[in-house]
Image: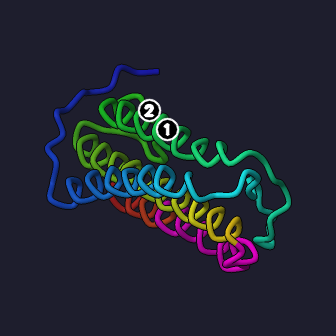
């Protein structure tokens, strides 16, 4: 692999908003998990099938598993976003397009971090609602919604990357 240029990318207002929103939603995920723990039954839904129905159950302590995974992943994504020269790109990088490509790729990563936090928060909310008998699972909308939350922005950023080459 060729040595790629390194840039100190400046955060635009959009980048700041995405970064902040990702951390705020992660905070909401933690607050929701901690707040709900005391009133959850001992056994809660821990897995949902493609239809949104609960198909696995476990200890209420598992309510903390998704916030832990989301936090570790968010920290990893944040660290990775500081090194866009290590990313794979769908187009050849040149001295003229490298900084724009890096900015686009890092913005996509930030959006994915936000999407991940939203998805995990919705799952925890669904676990709580199901455990309390207020819902019958995540619902049939959950899988298409989360797939769209990941696929649509990824396609947008990929198309943008090809247009910038």
Mark 2 vs 1: CB contact within 8 A: yes
Q: Which of the 4 image quadrants contains residue 129?
A: bottom right
Q: Which mark is residue 73?
A: 1
Q: Which mark is residue 17?
A: none
**Distance from the alpha carbon under mark 2 to that under mark 1:** 5 Å
**Span of residues in magenta:** 133-154
Q: Residue at x 74, y 53 (%)?
A: 46
User: x, y percentage for residue 136?
Assistant: 75, 77
Q: Residue at x 51, y 64 (%)?
A: 155
User: x, y percentage for residue 131?
Assistant: 70, 65
Q: Nearer the viewer, residue 137 or 17?
A: 137
Q: How is the image coloured?
A: rainbow
User: x, y percentage for residue 105?
Assistant: 37, 47
Residue designated by label 2 = 76
Residue found at the far right of this picture: 55
Q: Is residue 72 magenta?
A: no
Side of 139 relative to 97 (left or right) = right
- The 10 Å Cα crowd at callout 1, few under 14, some 14 to 19, many 20 or more, is some
């Amino acid at each position: 692999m060729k040595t790629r240029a390194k840039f100190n990318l400046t955060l635009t207002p959009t980048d700041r908003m995405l970064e902040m929103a990702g951390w705020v939603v992660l905070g909401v995920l933690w607050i929701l998990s901690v707040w709900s723990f005391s009133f959850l039954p001992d056994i809660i839904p821990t897995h949902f099938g493609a239809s949104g129905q609960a198909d696995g159950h476990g200890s209420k302590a598992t309510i903390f598993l998704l916030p832990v995974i989301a936090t570790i992943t968010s920290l990893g994504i944040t660290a990775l976003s500081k090194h866009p020269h290590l990313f794979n790109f769908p187009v050849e990088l040149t001295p003229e397009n490298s900084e724009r490509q890096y900015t686009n790729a890092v913005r996509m990563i930030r959006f994915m971090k936000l999407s991940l936090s939203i998805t995990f928060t919705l799952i925890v909310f669904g676990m709580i609602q199901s455990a309390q008998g207020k819902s019958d699972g995540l619902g049939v909308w959950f899988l298409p919604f989360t797939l769209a939350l990941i696929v649509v922005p990824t396609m947008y950023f990929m198309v943008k990357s090809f247009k910038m080459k």
